[in-house]
Image (cartoon, rainbow, N blue to C red):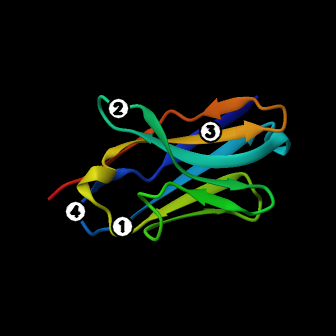
Amino acid sequence: QVQLVESGGGLVQPGGSLRLSCVASGSIDSIYRMGWYRQAPGSQRDLVATITNSGPTNYADSVKGRFTISRADAKNTVYLQMNSLKPEDTAVYYCHAMSREFMNYWGQGTQVTVSS
């Protein structure tokens, strides 16, 4: 089992920045890939960015050039640096981890609101 705890959400003005953090605990050696998804009210949960153990990253087109995903050296913490935030980035952001056995784990979510 893997437990994920997010932090770093909040209210920010358009054009501003936030950094989200996600700390994994439990069977962290089983984790193959970590990432971030987001869900706006009335919408489905969508991919934001992922990063594998070996380093390759993947981003949704809507955030390319503005968001950066990274992992700490200990590999149990993943970050999402969000710059040039737009009102349409407003959503609950969820940390996700996938194990080598293709088990999916989710955090509880953290709210990001971009508004003036």
Residues marked 3 and 2 touching at CB (< 8 Å) = no
**Amino acid type for the residue under numbered disc 4:** Gln
Q: Name the secondary structure under disc 3.
A: strand
- Sequence-wise, which precedes: disc 3 or disc 2? 3
- Residue 52 vertical position relative to residue 67 in the rendered view, above or below: above
Q: Residue at x 43, y 68 (%)?
A: 66
Q: Nearer the viewer, mark 3 or mark 2?
A: 2
Which label was assigned to residue 17? 1
Report how far apart the C-alphas of labels 1 and 2 lie in the structure. 23 Å
Q: CA distance from mark 1 to mark 4?
A: 8 Å
Q: Secondary structure at mark 2?
A: loop
Q: Earlier in the sequence, mark 1 or mark 3?
A: 3
Whole-angstrom CA distance, mark 3 to mark 2, is 23 Å
Residue on which the image places disc 3: 4
Label whose residue precedes the other's in the sequence (1 or 2): 1
Q: Are marks 1 and 2 in contact (CB under 8 Å)?
A: no
Query: Is label 1 in a helix, a strand or a loop?
Result: loop
Determine whether, in the image, residue 60 is placed left or right of residue 83: right
**Residue 78's image quarter?**
bottom right
| Crowd class of label 1 (few under 14; some 14 to 19; many from 20; radius 10 Å) | some
Question: Quarter of the image containing the N terminus?
Answer: top right
The CA distance from mark 1 to mark 3 is: 23 Å
Would you name the residue on which mark 4 appears?
Answer: 13
Asked if 66 appears above or below 37 in the picture, the reply is below
Q: Quadrant of residue 55?
A: bottom right
Residue furthest to the front: 61
Please give the label number shown on residue 43: 2
How many numbered discs, if any? 4
